[in-house]
Amino acid sequence: MLNFSILIMLLLTVSTISASPAALHTGFQQKSLEHINSFRSRFANAAQIANMQKMRYNRTLEATIQNYTSSCDLLDDMGDMPTYAILDKNFIDSHIRQTEIHQDHLEVYEYHIEILLGPDRTVTHILHPLATQVGCALMASPCKWPRGHEEWPTIGKIQTICLVGEV
């Protein structure tokens, strides 16, 4: 009877830990979340957004985006999924500078970024102030970003792709 009670307590503990969005099990998850929250915070300051929410890591979103990481060609199948490719510091610094410069007409600037990066491949999803959840996965090999039309310039190669939760 005592062993059965211990087993039940262990099962309850494990289910509580796995359901907790705050319990990050890998350095990759923590590093991805820190990168995203830092980018969002810097953008919120540059764009004077007062209600930018802090993101939480969601393993269900990670499992979903993981389905697209075995081949670069699978990224083309994501359709209109709200994704964010973790980009290098130079791109982020440039985006923040441009946000500060174009603060009075950010809608026009975001439109030009979307033209540059292609539809649904912008930083718009990850920078939505009310977005609160994200899950990320490593690509099997680095992939050209953005994907799609050849007229879109390539920012570089990405190794991490993230899925942003619904707002």
Image: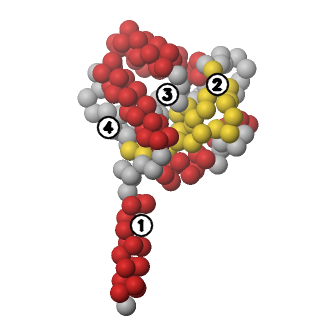
Q: Which residue is mark 1?
A: 14
Three-letter residue code for mark 4: Gln
Q: Are marks 4 and 2 in contact (CB under 8 Å)?
A: no
Q: Indicate the amino acid at tag 2.
A: Lys
* Residue toward you, 46 or 25: 25
User: Tags 3 and 4 in contact by the CB under 8 Å rule?
Assistant: no
Of residue 117 and residue 157, the one placed in the foreground of this image is 157
Within the image, what quadrant is residue 131 found in?
A: top left
The mark nearer the N terminus, 2 or 1, is 1
Which percent across, then down, holds residue 34?
40, 34
Disc 2 packing (10 Å; few <14; some 14–19; many ≥20): some
Q: Earlier in the sequence, mark 3 or mark 2?
A: 3
Q: Which residue is mark 2?
A: 157
The residue carrying pointer 4 sits among few (fewer than 14), some (14 to 19) or many (20 or more) residues within 10 Å by Cα, namely: some
Amino acid at the residue labelled 1: Val
Label 3 – label 2 distance at C-alpha: 16 Å
